[in-house]
Image: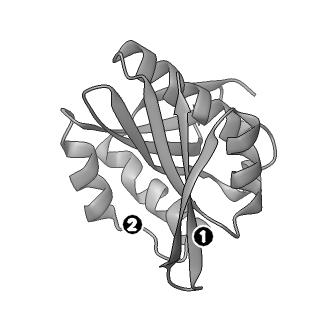
Amino acid sequence: MELVFEKAKQEDLEKIAAIEQVSFPDPWSVDSLWTFASDETIRTLVTAKEKESGELVGYYALQYVLDEAEIAIVAVAAKYRRQGVGRELIEAVKQFCKRKKISVIHLEVRSGNEAAVHLYRAMGFQETGCRKNYYDKPREDALLFSLSI
């Protein structure tokens, strides 16, 4: 499957929000997504679409300042999981950061999200800390990761 990455458009937000609903216990609303995407000086919301069909398969949200960035969201539509889309999204984040001269990428993830934790470790992210009981629904720790690029 070949993916095309592009900045999210307003017409993408309903589909992004639908993926949020099934992916996270505390999903972002359409309004929150649009607010995030609207500040292009320090944030970006990027979609991954299947090249042939144009179907939205995933997205990432990234905020950045100077030479550091933080991944706010990485999500893949349920039917496209375990097909390498998450890896491609992280690679797209890395390429974006290289173009912006960003040297460190940070993120946090639920400790119970084993697939994401495995992916981040496999892609070279190093665990840098833990925020105890950070998340609700369910109560979980947040693992902190960083990657120097």
Tag 1: amino acid: Val
Q: What kind of element bears circle 2? A: loop
The image position of residue 124, as x and y in percent, is: 68, 32
Label ID, residue 9:
none
Q: Residue at x 58, y 73 (%)?
A: 141
Assign the N terminus to one quadrant of the image.
top right
Q: Residue at x 63, y 41 (%)?
A: 126
Label ID, residue 22:
1
Tag 2: amino acid: Trp
Is 36 drawn above or below residue 134 in the view shown? above
Q: Residue at x 18, y 32 (%)?
A: 41
The image position of residue 122, as x and y in percent, is: 76, 37
Q: Residue at x 45, y 70 (%)?
A: 27
- Spatial CA distance of label 1 from label 2 is 11 Å
Asked if residue 5 lies left or right of residue 66, the reply is right
N-term-proximal mark, 1 vs 2: 1
Disc 2 packing (10 Å; few <14; some 14–19; many ≥20):
some
Q: Which residue is mark 2?
A: 28
